[in-house]
Each structure stands twice: as C-alpha cells, then as structure tokens.
Image: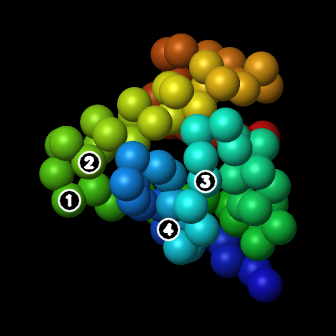
Amino acid sequence: MIDKNPVISVVDGKICINGHTFEEHELRESKEYLQSIGAEEAVFSPENDEELNELHSIVERMEKASPEASGKDAASYYLN
C-alpha cells in the first residue's frame, strides 16, 4: 500500500499514524511503518495549540528514548 501523505494525530498521549498507535519507545517502528507505506510527508493538523504542544512533547520523549534521534533545534521532524 502506498500512502504518500499519512495523517498523524495524538491519541491518549501517543503518536498515531493512520490509526496505528506507537508507544514512546517505538520511534524505529514508526519510521519503519512510514517507510513501508511509501510516505513522503506526514500531515498533522492540530485542532489547537494544546494538541500541537502535546505532539511536540511526545516527539521529544521519543527522541530521548531513541539513540538514533538527534537535533534539538529542528523546525520539523524527520525519521530518516
């Protein structure tokens, strides 16, 4: 299945991509999922600033839990 623009959402304090929920320690799994569907750019449309801040917080926690993550001043998030 190819999905060049999957949808990211926040569900119960976790990142959800196209309905697949990933725990904080599953940064690699989320990356592998995005690669498996041929994603080029994920879409995140927060309903408010609180939801945007929650995603940012989740990504920071995932980054701390993963040795492959790097870069604190990124304006966007890349899983390459």
Q: Does label 4 or label 3 sit earlier along the sequence?
A: 4
Disc 3, disc 2: CB below 8 Å?
A: no
Q: What amino acid is labelled 1 in the image?
A: Glu
Instruction: Kindly indicate whether the residue at mark 1 contacts the one at mark 4 (C-beta within 8 angstroms).
Output: no
Side of 55 where 3 appears, left or right: right
Q: Residue at 72% across / 26% down in the picture?
A: 66
**Tag 4 residue:** 7
Identify which amino acid the numbered label 2 is placed on.
Glu
Q: Is residue 31 visible?
A: no
| Coordinates of residue 77 in the picture (x, y in percent) | 56, 37
Q: Nearer the viewer, mark 4 or mark 3?
A: 3
Callout 3 amino acid: Phe
Residue linked to disc 2: 51
Mark 1 neighbour density, 10 Å: few (under 14) some (14–19) many (20 or more): few
Closer to the chain start, of discs 3 and 2, is 3
Relative to 33, 20 lies left or right: left
Quadrant housing residue 56: top left
Q: CA distance from mark 3 to mark 1?
A: 20 Å
Which circle's residue, 4 or 1, is located before the other in the chain? 4
Is residue 63 visible in the rendered image? The answer is yes
User: What amino acid type should be assigned to the residue bearing mark 4?
Assistant: Val
- Could you tell me which residue is drawn at 19 percent across and 42 percent down? 50
Mark 4 → mark 2, Cα distance in angstroms: 14 Å
